[in-house]
Image: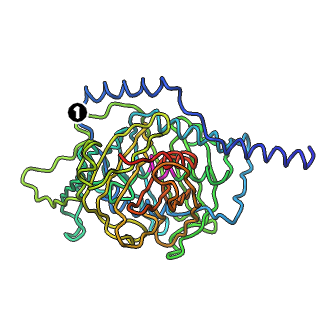
Amino acid sequence: MSNETDHRDERLGAALRALDQPEHRPEFHRELRGRLSAERRASRRRWAWPLAAAATAAAVAVALIAIGIPRTHKTPSIAGPQPASAALVKSHLREALTAMRNLSGMLVATEASRGTTERWRFVLDVAGDVRLEGPGDGEVVTYDSSTGVARSIQHSASMGGSALFYAERTGVAPGPPDLGPPSWLIPERLGAYVRAALASRDPGVREVTYEGRAAWRLDVHTVPNAVAPELSGDELQVTVDRRTGMPVLVVEQKQGKVLRTLRLGQLAVDTAPAAGAFRAQFPAGAEVMRSDDGFQRVPLARAAGVAGYRPLVPDRVPAGYELAEVAVARESAPTGKEGGNPRSQGVVSLSYRRGLDQFLVTTRLRGNGTWSDPLASGEGFVDHPDRVDLPAGALAGADAELVLSPRALPHLWALTDDLVVTVGGDLSRSELTRVAGSLRAR
């Protein structure tokens, strides 16, 4: 084959991989929503876990996913039999996260430098509700998305690690950029990482077998954290289960040496959880530390009355997505890298869900402060946003930036004369632009 033909095929392949994947047929989502509604009516209330309440799990998450693909280096392709296209893997990831009603399994995190291994058993459903058990005996963390209430039962380090500590947070925001519950590690943060990596570049995919199941493996070169380079690697290997579309193994290496691994096992899809599985119960008479993050669930029609302005709502959302939560806070914690933005005032957070996928539209008053990206990657990393010109909608003419980085949720943010606006979550570049371009005040 000639060099000219090779180059033509490479260009054609790149163009095809850049195309958005087709959505499910319209009947699929109606049928799925009908099944979910019937299940909810027949089941007890569902509960979920906020990652912020599990300090150890959060540390593992930051170490594993706060790494990025350099923009200035070509990620090498992977030699191997029967290479799969990145577009195909991305399609399976999207389909799996959309179609599942619930997922359960075991999460195992190993730190090679310390020689430690910790385990968490998890169950989650399409409402964003999850139960997490571990890593210590008796430790449980839950979150109820319908009420915005988080509960945790964990060992207290201040009491020698033997006593259990009970805490309850009310008024929790539906998701980032506001505090808690952060996107859960496996279905959203890590899944979004893989999708972002595939969207940014084709890192090379090979078909493998993992624990007797068909899988794909992605090998990606990464940039160590600038603040603590010794704690982050220069290469990431992600193994994706082909049946569920879930990342089941992540290996982070530096100069060929394994730093840490994250492993999913005992996966079960769409199995009925045990009665009471989604609610952590405090013992009678337990001393509970209570706090309120300030967000209240309201109908969309009441949001303007609480926030003091008409929030921006999209006219167009990708097929299958529906508005799942509306939460409003008169005041909330600062956002952005290291909480560097002003304290938020008049926040409206709209959560849209499609299976296990989620994206959020948030607005907050701009005030007189100086703002940076509310959804920026963590300290020690530098994002490379693309400037976006939105020709229509409430953000037409506004300063807008789009970030597709494996270190953060894919997102677009903008400043208007009065508002700070974010659109972030499980959306492609074109979807982020379309949603942001359809925003209007309601």
Side of 206 relative to 275 (left or right): right
- Most extreme residue toward the left is 285
Q: Nearer the viewer, residue 363 or 175?
A: 363
Locate the C terminus by quadrant.
Answer: top left
Locate the N terminus by quadrant.
Answer: top right
Side of 107 relative to 215 (left or right): left
Give residue 72's position: percent from left, percent from top. 68, 66
- Most extreme residue toward the bottom is 227
Q: Which residues are magenta?
A: 186-192
Q: How many marks?
A: 1
Which residue type does callout 1 highlight? Answer: Arg
Q: Nearer the viewer, residue 183 or 339?
A: 339
Side of 428 relative to 4 (left or right): left
Is residue 26 depicted above or below 154 in this figure?
above
Taking the image as drawn, is residue 18 in sight?
yes
Task: Find disc 1 in the rendering and name its residue.
Answer: 44
**Residue at the (56%, 44%) spot, across then down:** 240
- Residue 292 inside the magenta-drawn segment: no
Is residue 34 depicted above or below 68 in this figure?
above
Give residue 143's position: percent from left, percent from top. 27, 48
Magenta: main secondary structure equals helix
Is residue 94 depicted above or below 375 in this figure?
above
- Most extreme residue toward the right is 2
